[in-house]
Image (tube, helix red, strand yellow):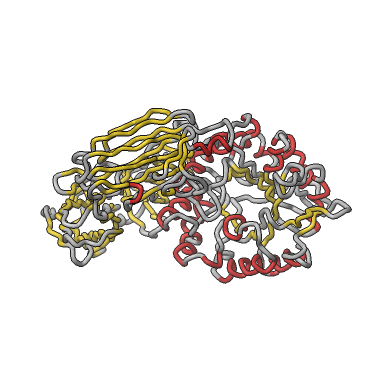
Amino acid sequence: MESAAQQVLSPTPYQGWNTYFGLGGNFSAESVKEVADALVSRGLARAGYDIVWLDGGWQDPEPRTAAGDLQADRTRFPNGLKPLVDYIHAKGLRAGIYTDAGPYIPGKCGLGSGGYYQRDADQFAAWEFDAVKVDFLCGIAANLDPKTVYTEFARALRNNASGRPIIFNLCNPVTSPDWGMYPEEQQSTYSWTYAPEIAQSWRTYTDVGFVGDIKFKDVLRNYDANARHPEVAGPGHYNDPDYLAPGLGMTDEEFRTQMTLWAAAAAPLVIGSDVRKLSQTSVDILTDPDMLAINQDAAGVQAVRVGPAGTTETWVKRLADGDRAVVLLNRGESPKVLTTTAAAVGLSGARFTVENAWTDQITESAGTISAAVPAHGAALFRVGPAAGVPGVPHVTAGLPQVTRVGADPVPDGYVPMVAGGDEARVEVVVRNDGLRPVLAPQVGLATPADWTVRPLSKAPSELLPGRAATFAFAVALPPSAEPGAASLTATTSYEVLGHGRLRQTTVSAVVVAPAPPDGEVVLSHHQWVSATSGWMSPTVDLSVGGWSPISMLGQVYPIGIGVASPSTVRYYVGKECSRLTAVVGLDDAVRNVGPEGATATFQVIGDGQVLFDTGVLTRDDIRQVDVDLTGVRVLDLVVGDAGDGGYNDRANWAGLNATC
């Protein structure tokens, strides 16, 4: 019989669920059983999500018995863990558990296996666990070397007394930009140098977010860190960018993008949310068969970027049958039509089949691969050579895009914003990347009921291969237009010989602005359009987190906004304001954390143009802001991380006053 050390325990990326984000640290045998039931009843287990993983919190306040054995919380798991594991196995699922590579240090970490590696490995196997996640919170607190201790733990796991195969997830989340300054060899970004030889997966960066607060920017951060060393991934061993986070702070579109990126990265797919509470949309995204086929492809290849990094990017993953999985990623704030070519992703020939993993649409291209990608969105295609009867041409129907409001162009990369009484120009670009023409292309535009739409362009009689047409509309809002989110829906149709009239529907969001400020206004008390913070959420008249008054260099400010970098706070001022004054700097609360970090930049941006820039500020700097706002429609208050990450960057916009 093949030993655990020789087996390929996870030929393709493993899938499952973990307690950490969804249930926190206070889960019980009953709540875990309920989630196991939900994995089965909601079709997630059938789609491959079959590991029920207990994270930190399962242990007793006294983690070890007098004899030195690990023990579960005696209140929440009165019968211990073995009956729970048996229940999980009886559902046709596998069970996972958590420990730490360092020694248990009360007050600094909740559980540690340091000094007990073989004993704990034998215990996990005796309980019949199938996977173990090994953290490094105790390890970093004890100043251990990750490579040394993880190698020792991996050996103990392979040599467990039961001879049980157990998946090893090496989880060192320590990173300098987010944790403070640590030697390179102690960080997650170093794990790739040794982990592929000892583990089935290894974390490549810090946590993807906080409990109940997963931000899209941090999903991108973790994906980018995970992409640094694709060469070490392959069947049985994978880079791990952390958990999937539906319903924990991101929109459905943003979560679909995370799913797209994790699929292309050949990443383990572990749900971090409470499965019992997931929307059906989230379940549908998690279980999409075409997406999962790309993630579970037998070649185990991780996607790499084609071309430069930027707001829009192309990523490609080679599949076992020679096809390519292609990702067109839009990191920005406005919809885009993105393109690449078959040659650029490593394919040759004159005809290509393009299968959209999310819509199931199958088309044929002459070599250009394009998609209309919403803000924070991603298209996922499977592309391969085409043969036989010519297929349906690959036509990209663009998303409706606001290009002008009145006489003012909308800055590239901005969420479009309109207000009651405005007239906007909206454009829809339709392109034909197929081998055959499409006939009689038409676009209709639908808006909220009390808005009016007037076509500005004439439809062509046909759209030849390699050509594009722009359909333009004038959209007028009534003065009473309700502030908030609104949708623009374009219906594009065209004739294809032998296939009749085909249709595509694309939808874009537009923001209807609230009333602009009037008079002498405390802007922090005025309704913002949107506000982001690198950590937690922006707070009004308090430092970020809401725990203390705004304070800089010992002076307390009663009004203002506290944020963590990076941050953008957006206001609609509607050309009604003439002046903005404030005091900016790092909050004195950073001095309670330590000497590391606490650098930031502050910018005031009007309609995409920088009106004020502090340069880099430290905890010992403040700046007076006095900016002319004449003619500005949309005002952005932007805080950057000064290029060294957001660790300890608690920034303030104090005394924020506008003259309008």
State whether residue 250 is above or below residue 552: below
Where residue 609 sits, quadrant-wise, is top left
State whether residue 216 is above or below residue 44: above
Residue 572: image location, x then y, percent: 27, 49
Q: Is residue 101 left or right of residue 415?
A: right
Question: Viewer-proximal residue, 401 or 387?
Answer: 401
Residue 367: image location, x then y, percent: 32, 44
Residue at 35 percent across and 35 percent down: it is 603
Residue at 76 percent across and 59 percent down: it is 72
How many callouts does the rendering have? 0
Residue at 62 percent across and 61 percent down: it is 50
Q: Is residue 153 left or right of residue 424?
A: right
Asked whether the viewer can see residue 299, the reply is no
Question: Viewer-proximal residue, 65 or 627?
Answer: 627
Residue 518: image location, x then y, percent: 23, 50
Q: Is residue 541 left or right of residue 339?
A: right
